[in-house]
Image: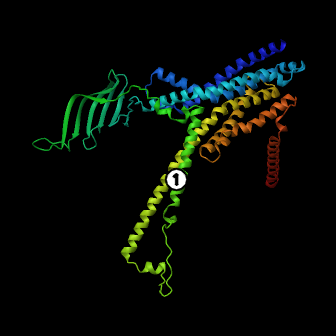
């Protein structure tokens, strides 16, 4: 009964910290994500509902990145607080081992890992599809018209607009020049006006330009009437209204634009796609091999019948060089042209086959990477717990100071290794499983080592680690050499 109360106390202490750190980490990675796509959001006049939907799906898509960091930080803080407040020491003094203390946490993290797998397999394909569709729709949306002063604005298709000065109070543009290429460059129209105003129609599908006191020049090179060809037309006006088709409404694209992407598939669909693409790559390789065997240089002569040699016949001996010298220049030119065209065809065929094989192999690797990532998130959460919990018990520091620093350093190391392995797997330098599981394989022994040290009550200081000792020794040596060099220079100067 007391153990159950203890477990309940431990879970309550951890759960609040875990939720707080998770939302903090999610907010941080979300800001980094939004900074990456800020150009897709600014200047588009997107409605609040569209932005809210985008933030929602972006936050959900970043859960795989925020969850391991939150587990690491919350484990460090919780066990650091236990050690700092001597609660961990009291539990050990009562005869409760560290593994027994960690038992409810392990059960909770196991449930989180299982939930993370189902989230990656079932929810992430839908989330990624919606997010990709939103991004595609926002990229296709026409940006709001914001004509700058003193430079040409080319944001409207078929038009170049120049405004020398703007009056924000009167919402007036002064000294306008408009180049209309909507009917082609040959039929360009140029308009100049002293001032003008710009507005949008009620349905947001038409841009209205009201011009005052100006002239227009239109090239009529390709137009003619029944009497005489008119090269151009010039018009002076006191007021002129121009209507430009400009759809500024936001329209959501069809989800089918992302339905065939690797990120929009679950584990079963990814496995099927990997097998199908592997079969295509192998079939293409076999086809190219058989085609090469039957190429020009590997042709076999079929239906060959040996001819009996006539002992009385006198055979003349020929050489290739003599035959070549006996050809005329025209014959040699034809032979050269024939072989050059054959070589070009062979080169084009080989390049196309290589490009086709590369495309299939790249798509297969992308699908295989996504398939492995369904599992790496769960294992990363487990590994980070077995790093954070014993490390917090060792350093015995809670709060947001030391745990945050250590968590950020460890997560940056994990992210660098994971990103390096991902790139190696994506480019085909390493096997997919080797590149994707590299970060977990590197940090897992570190977690086992820390858990063993914390369970045996061995306090590990940084200077006890061999690598750190070598670095400290190196810097001490460099410092001594610099001091010796400084004293030598001082002696020589005297």
Q: Residue at x 71, y 20 (%)?
A: 17
Farthest-out residue, left: 227
x and y, in percent, of residue 183 in the image: 27, 39
Which residue sits at x=40%, y=74%?
332
Q: Position of residue 126 (x, y in %)?
A: 54, 27
The quadrant of the picture occupied by the N terminus is top right
Q: Which residue is mark 1?
A: 287
| Residue 132 visible in image | yes
Q: Give SS at disc 1.
A: helix
Observer-nearest residue: 218 or 162?
218
Instruction: Let me know if residue 41 appears in the view.
Output: no
Above or below 186: residue 294:
below
**Left or right: where 369 falls relative to 305:** right
How many marks do you count on the picture? 1
Q: Nearer the viewer, residue 137 or 17?
A: 137
Examine the image and state in which quarter residue 56 appears. Answer: top right
């Amino acid at each position: 009964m007391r153990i159950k109360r203890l477990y309940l106390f431990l879970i309550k202490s951890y759960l609040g910290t875990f939720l707080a750190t998770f939302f903090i980490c999610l907010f941080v990675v979300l800001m980094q994500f939004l900074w990456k796509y800020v150009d897709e959001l600014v200047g588009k006049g997107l409605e609040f509902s569209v932005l809210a939907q985008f933030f929602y799906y972006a936050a959900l898509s970043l859960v795989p990145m925020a969850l391991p960091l939150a587990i690491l930080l919350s484990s460090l803080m919780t066990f650091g607080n236990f050690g700092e407040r001597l609660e961990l020491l009291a539990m050990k003094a009562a005869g409760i081992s560290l593994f027994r203390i960690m038992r409810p946490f392990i059960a909770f993290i196991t449930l989180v890992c299982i939930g993370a797998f189902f989230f990656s397999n079932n929810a992430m394909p839908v989330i990624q599809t919606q997010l990709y569709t939103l991004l595609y729709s926002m990229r296709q949306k026409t940006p709001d018209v914001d004509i700058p002063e003193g430079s040409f604005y080319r944001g409207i298709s078929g038009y170049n607009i120049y405004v020398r000065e703007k009056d924000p109070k009167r919402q007036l543009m002064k000294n306008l020049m408009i180049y209309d290429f909507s009917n082609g460059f040959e039929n360009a129209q140029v308009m100049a006006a002293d001032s003008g105003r710009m507005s949008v129609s009620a349905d947001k599908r038409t841009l209205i330009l009201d011009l005052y006191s100006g002239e227009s020049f239109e090239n009529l090179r390709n137009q003619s009437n029944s009497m005489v060809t008119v090269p151009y037309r010039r018009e002076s006006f006191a007021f002129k209204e121009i209507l430009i088709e400009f759809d500024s409404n936001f329209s959501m694209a069809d989800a089918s634009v992302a339905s065939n992407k690797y990120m929009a598939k679950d584990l079963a669909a990814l496995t099927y796609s990997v097998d199908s693409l592997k079969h295509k790559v192998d079939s293409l390789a076999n086809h190219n091999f058989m085609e090469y065997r039957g190429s020009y240089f590997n042709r076999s002569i079929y239906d060959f019948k040996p001819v009996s040699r006539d002992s009385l016949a006198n055979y003349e001996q020929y050489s290739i060089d003599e035959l070549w010298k006996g050809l005329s220049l025209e014959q040699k030119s034809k032979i050269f042209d024939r072989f050059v065209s054959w070589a070009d065809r062979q080169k084009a065929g080989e390049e196309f086959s290589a490009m086709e094989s590369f495309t299939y192999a790249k798509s297969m690797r992308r699908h295989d990477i996504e398939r492995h990532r369904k599992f790496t998130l769960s294992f990363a959460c487990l590994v980070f717990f077995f790093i954070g919990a014993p490390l917090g018990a060792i350093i015995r520091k809670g709060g947001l100071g030391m745990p945050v620093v250590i968590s950020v350093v460890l997560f940056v190391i994990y992210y660098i290794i994971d990103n390096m392995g991902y790139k190696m797997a994506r480019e085909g330098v390493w096997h997919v499983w080797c590149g994707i599981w590299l970060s977990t394989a590197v940090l897992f022994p570190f977690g086992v080592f820390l858990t063993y040290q914390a369970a045996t009550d061995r306090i590990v200081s940084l200077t006890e680690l061999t690598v750190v000792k070598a670095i400290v020794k190196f810097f001490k040596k460099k410092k001594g050499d610099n001091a010796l060099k400084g004293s030598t220079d001082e002696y020589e100067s005297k």
